[in-house]
Image: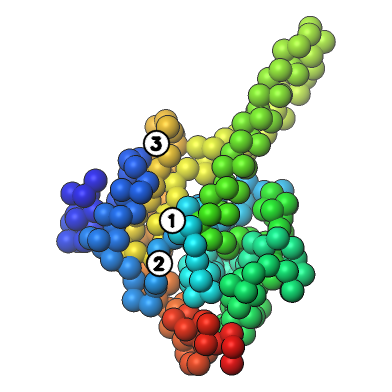
Amino acid sequence: MRLAIEAVASGEAAGVVSAGNTGALMALAKIVLKTLPGIDRPAMAGIAPSAKGEVVMLDLGANIACDPRNLVEFAVMGDVFARIVLGLPKPTLGLLNVGSEEQKGDETRRQAAEILRASPIGAQFYGFVEGHDIAAGTTDVIVTDGFSGNIALKTGEGALHLVGTLLREIFTASLSARLGYLLARSSLERLRDWLDPRRYNGAVMVGLNGVVVKSHGGTDAKGFAHAVEVAIDMVANRFNDQIRDGLAAMVAALPDASPQSPRRAASS
């Protein structure tokens, strides 16, 4: 794993895809590649199915606790990620919270929201969203800390697995159910393909000075191939250069409220 990351650092490789231990991959990548200028902490970003197509989520577990600066940086990186992976010119951004009202949540989220509203991506900032908004597709990007992000991810994975299990039980319960399956087979196969976790395999460790993609350790060849495709998209679309541009625009527009000093910005 370290040799692969060092190949990226030396320029021998354009990116690395690994199905190894997530913590080890992140730790090695931070040591060898280091973070991009202006980025305090890297995050894990991935995509999930929603009622309106697909939704980007970050952080998915790299940072258990975050301050306003981290959440603002995640929003900038999530914006770039959605534009590259989902092909959206101006993706909408939501900050995961315990309620959608502006007064809800802790001070960290309220400060981050205040900065985002005044930022160059303020027009894309929807505001606070709740857990049900992820599957509903209320926004194209869900920004949160790694603690709640990982819980939301695992909850969603469990829900998809439950749906699959229940459908199998329902359509094998009786002869009439089997006949019903035959009639609905083409639609059910489309549903299965849409919910196939291999379609969403490949979480990008955004904010690093190089392209690093984490594949699920239990995936098959199809799932790993998708992770490789994600890495290729990141390289081909100059993902890190676009993050640098996004941060530069943020600092230029908010000279007294840059992502590096959100606490000061929120109190000004």
Mark sitting on residue 160 = none
Check disc 3: other Cα within 10 Å, few if <14, some if 14-19, many if 20+.
some
N-term mark: 2 or 1: 2
x and y percentages locating residue 222 in the rendered image: 44, 34
Mark 3 highlights which residue? 217
What amino acid type is highlighted by mark number 1?
A: Ala
Mark sitting on residue 62 = 1
Mark 2 highlights which residue? 41
x and y percentages locating residue 11 in the rendered image: 20, 61
N-term mark: 1 or 3: 1
x and y percentages locating residue 218 in the rendered image: 42, 32
Q: Is 60 drawn above or below residue 80 in the view shown?
A: above
Instruction: Please say if the residues under marks 1 and 3 sit with CB atoms less than 8 Å apart.
Output: no
> How is colour applied across the structure in the image?
rainbow
Nearest the eye: 241 or 27: 27
How far apart marks 2 and 1 lie (CA) works out to 9 Å
Residue displayed at 53% across by 54% down: 147
Q: Is residue 14 visible?
A: no
How far apart marks 3 and 2 lie (CA) works out to 24 Å
Q: Residue furthest right?
A: 176
What amino acid type is highlighted by mark number 3?
A: Gly
Q: Quadrant of residue 260?
A: bottom left
